[in-house]
Image (cartoon, rainbow, N blue to C red):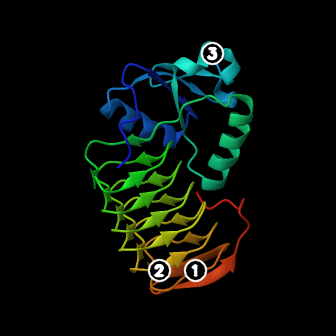
Amino acid sequence: MTDDTHQKSRQLIIIGAGGHASSIVNVAFSLSYSIFGFIHSQKAGQSFFDRPIFGDLREINALDTYDFFLALGDNYLREKYLNETLQRFPYLNFPSLIHPTADVSPFSKIGNGTLVMPNSVIGPNALIGSFCILGSQSCVGHSSLLADFSSLSPAATLAGAVNVGLRSAVGLGAKVREKVKIGNDSVLGANSFLNKDLPNNVVAFGSPALVKQTRESSDSYLR
């Protein structure tokens, strides 16, 4: 398991101020974080959870004294925004946020900037990359791998030794059979059952799941 990287004496700045940001606030509060504020260029000057919304990181002094978290649910956009932000502010700290109700094996590993929502399960020898999202009640079986910027929607289930590729997304309530590999930038639809490997850049759904179309990395999949 990852080290306890969040520092409760440090305040958290959340980049984003929408629905996903509210889920991050919930996890952050469960870890006794204090929220300093939010970043959202189109909502600057407003407030969210009684905290100010800033238009840009440059409006905040001493950025190195805060922790940060990306509130962007889309996997491609999360990576894109992170890369752009680190070019301007390479010293920012992005801890993982793991809700106390999550059942996380001490033999698993979790990267920086990853969100683990309430009642999730992460089995032994699982490797969770950086800036991933594990939705509430999702399950990652033993020896499974989630590559950086990938995501599991609520109640998604991976059996043992499943491999989810870069920026790929497993939909709400979907299930993946053991030892199956999902390529990069692919999407498995809600309530699907996947029992064979998926290539890169496809959308699949059904039970059993079948490839329905191809997609570009930047194609939106969240509604």
Who's the residue at 47% across and 46% down the image? 114
Q: Type of residue at label 3? A: Ile
Q: Are marks 1 and 3 in contact (CB under 8 Å)?
A: no
Q: Are marks 2 and 1 in contact (CB under 8 Å)?
A: yes
The answer, for residue 55, to whether it is visible in the render is no
* Location of mark 2 (residue): 180
Foreground of the two, 135 or 64:
64
Residue 60: assigned label? 3
Q: Who comes first in sequence, dot 1 or dot 3? A: 3
Foreground of the two, 91 or 32:
91
Who's the residue at 63% across and 79% down the image? 199
Residue 198: assigned label? 1
The answer, for residue 23, to whether it is visible in the render is yes
In screen coordinates, is 24 left or right of 17? Answer: left
Q: Position of residue 120 (x, y in %)?
A: 32, 55
Q: CA distance from mark 2 to mark 1?
A: 8 Å
The quadrant holding residue 127 is bottom left
Indicate the quadrant containing the C terminus: top left, top right, bottom left or bottom right.
bottom right
The quadrant holding residue 87 is top right
Q: Secondary structure at mark 1?
A: loop
Q: Which class describes the residues within 10 Å of circle 3: few (<14), some (14-19), or many (20+)? A: few
Q: Type of residue at label 2? A: Val
Who's the residue at 66% across and 74% down the image? 200
Q: Who comes first in sequence, dot 2 or dot 3? A: 3
Q: Position of residue 26 (x, y in %)?
A: 37, 36
Q: Who comes first in sequence, dot 2 or dot 1? A: 2
